[in-house]
Amino acid sequence: MLFLVSFIFFFTCTLLICYLALGIFSTSALRRYTYKNSFVNYNEIATSPLAPNISLVVPAYNEEKSIIHSVKNFLGLYYSNYEVIIVNDGSTDNTLQLLKNEFSLEKTNYFFDYKIPCEKIKGVWKSTKPEYKKLIVVDKVNGKCKADASNAGLNIAKNQFILNMDADGIIERDSLSKLIKPFLEEKKHKVIAAGGVIRILNSCKIENGVIKEINLPKKFFPRMQVLEYTRAFLLGRMAWSELDGLLLISGAMGMFDRKTMIAAGGYDASCLGEDMEAVVRMRRYMAEKGERYVVTYIPDPLCWTEAPSSLKDLKTQRVRWAKGLVDVLKKHSVMFFNPKYRNLGMLGYPFWLIFEWLAPTTAFIGMIYTVFLAVTGAINWPFFALLSGFIYSFSIFLSTWSVLFEELTFHKYRNKMDVLKLVLTSFVEPFLYVCIAWFSVKGNVEYFMGKNSWGKLKRGM
Amino acid sequence: MKKILIIAGVFFAFLITSFALQSAGVVAYPNLWTLHVNFAGHPIRVVDALVVSIIASISIMIVLLVFMLFNRTKLERREKLKQKLLVIFQGSILSYLQSWSDHEHYYNEIKSLLISKFRKQLLIDQICDISLNAKGDTSANLKKLFFDLELHKITYRKLHSGHWHKKIQAFKELYALNITDKNQVIYKYINSKNDILRMEAQIALVDLAKETDANPFEFLTNLHHPFSLWEQITLHQIMVQRELNVPDFGQWLFHKNHTVQMFCLRMIREYKQINNQARIKFLTFNEHPAVRKLAYEVIGDLGLKNVMAEVKYNYKDEPQDVKLEMLKSMTKSPDSSLLNFLHNIVDTEQDADLLIEAVKAIHSMEGGDEFLKDMMSKEYKNYNIIIKHVLDHRIN
């Protein structure tokens, strides 16, 4: 029995040490980025005739509540050369009709190739009004997943760069300039993808698709996710980008080199974690071709999205994430400790496999085992308390560290009390890990039993 | 996947065996309470390590929290002070500039305010801001004030600092005040390994060239590092904003650094330097596809019709994106002698983007519409759908 205890103990210690190391890498990367960014004038790129063209691809399925505001938000971005492609993925509500009415759309004779397979595209619509000339609406047969709709958008897009994003996300006005910058800075390594920080929209004040006031979510679950996102984006992904081991660019918003994405085969409609899978496949494609490339990540908060506000919705989301993760890891298992894929194969993939995938399961086994020991009276209570205290204090420390990063860099939450509330949330958050671990185990069990549906999330907008 | 399953299998087999061996009393694992870890020759109890970690985590967390709250208060206070001082500095500087006889009084007034590093830096920023839009006597007086207050010493110190971001701050201050004395120092960073420092050095030199007769882009001759599009955009914007003298960019079209060639092609297009036609044509044979693609783009934008008729034979050997640019150029500078060539492309190509561009090129040419009608009437290949796309004014 002590072997199991020892394993869980040393596994946890290794995990925490890894997080500490990632935090240190992240600190250096953030520091450099902040200095660098202080000299940048994004107006220059936004208004320059030399700026490259970008296509925003936005899959939309039953988004009648938010689609008009979202499209207005996308059309009002501060960048000169871009188009917005809304892909109506066979919505059963009034999404398409609302778009037609609001933007005076007409069906066009659009000719395109199915470069990447997707469900049938029924028509391509454009506005008769010149002020909406950047807007293209694609109507297609429902493909039962976001990946299929994104692929349809890729087939229609003509520009060199693609920004794929969620229809219910709110994008900052200067996001395009910030995301395109790494591609323009390209030197010896080709930049194939860039991601930015996603923030939680709950409790923020929105007017006509624009955020008027940023607030910390009032409800506990979204607030907990603010902390989680801050930690994941500022501590985790920033470090992985620095280590060239980044596996994931959030599906809520990511920019890609269109040519590379098409050559790699676009999004995999059969995969549950299509956003992560696309990045991994693009990276594999480049590595296998022997081309030098990078996937970059910028710490600026560029996109705001609504987080699940109830435990039920959180469960649906996390079960889906767990299924997506195991699916991607399974599909690309050839990369595991494979030097051909450089840091991605030697560091990134093993970390995700051992710590991101295995950690919740290990934690859950540990919890069950603890209950078993407690029931049988075999538990060493002082040691249990010490170990729990160690994990608890360390997790609070990590959360506070990430809040500090947010404070020193972007400090989006202007109210001093918000910072305090966020830190206080980190005191409660570790207790919820029991649920998070359970959702992950459930996702894995369902995946291996073949129950691979997406699940529905309720949106409050 | 096999590899993972094998590793997972071995791991679980090991776990179960160990568990069984321990249960049977064959093997005894050490108690974690008494387990010692060897650290630099000193045995440390795990329990002690845990206690230390807990204390350290909580202490650091408290320190971070206090720091955050104090930092917020400090920043808010500093911002308030900054706003207050900016108003005072602005007023004093303007009074200094406007008073012909009482310079000394305002000079002393400003000097008396400079009691900290923060205030000195704020004044430097303020002088730089005003100087960016100042001309003639105002600019000279600002420079005089800057030197009289010995603020240049701070800037020069930053220029020689070990921190790259401080050097950049110095570059910005030097070019805001048109101080050219340190150009040689800035020039050293033109080929710096630090890409931000390199770019800012380029900006500074281009900006400072307005004060001298020097060619603002002289540094291009010795540029070894890749010249990113970001740098190119930034420098182009500076040229536009500062209304700098535009050199003939044809002089660097055969630079050994292909990114410099690309910058020059872009600038030749922006400033319509058509006299470089022969050189641009030569670049359509360049070894880098990106250079060839851009050369075709520039040919189209500058309307160099006869060039396309001469280089159309390269088409079949080019990659898809270069082909696409060739066709776009033919649309931008239509030449009806290319009609049969384009018809041939529509017949042979499979790629939708190439087909659309070829039809667009035909449509743009004299007699192109009749040519398209004739194509639509032919039955052996259905051109209608592509032609309808091209003729749909809502799409293009």
Image: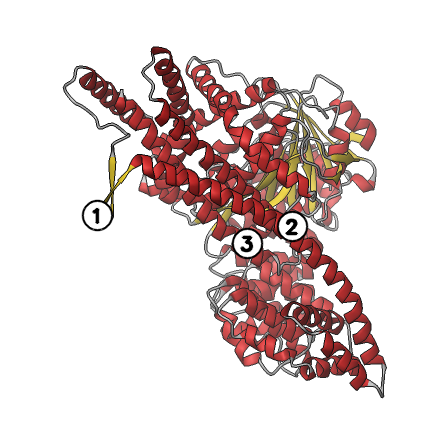
Distance of label 1 from label 3 (alpha carbons): 40 Å
Q: Residues within 10 Å of mark 3 (few under 14, many from 20)?
A: some
The residue under label 3 is A33
Image depth: mark 2 or mark 3 in front: 2
Give how far across and how far down residue A340 sits, in percent: 33, 42
Q: Compared to A162, does B131 lie above or below?
A: below
Look at the image and tell me in which quarter the N terminus of chain B lies: top left
| Residue identifier under label 2 | B72
Identity of the amino acid at label 1? Gly
Q: Which label sits on residue A92?
A: none
Tell me the residue at 53%/54% (across/down): A31
Which secondary structure, mark 2? helix
Residue A55 left/right relative to A20: right
The residue marked by circle 3 belongs to what chain?
A
Mark 2 residue type: Arg
A103 and B296: which one is in front?
A103
Q: Quadrant of residue B178?
A: bottom right
The residue that disc 1 covers is B41
Circle 1 marks a residue in which chain? Answer: B
Q: Position of residue A356 (x, y in %)?
A: 43, 31
- State the colouring used for the structure image: secondary structure
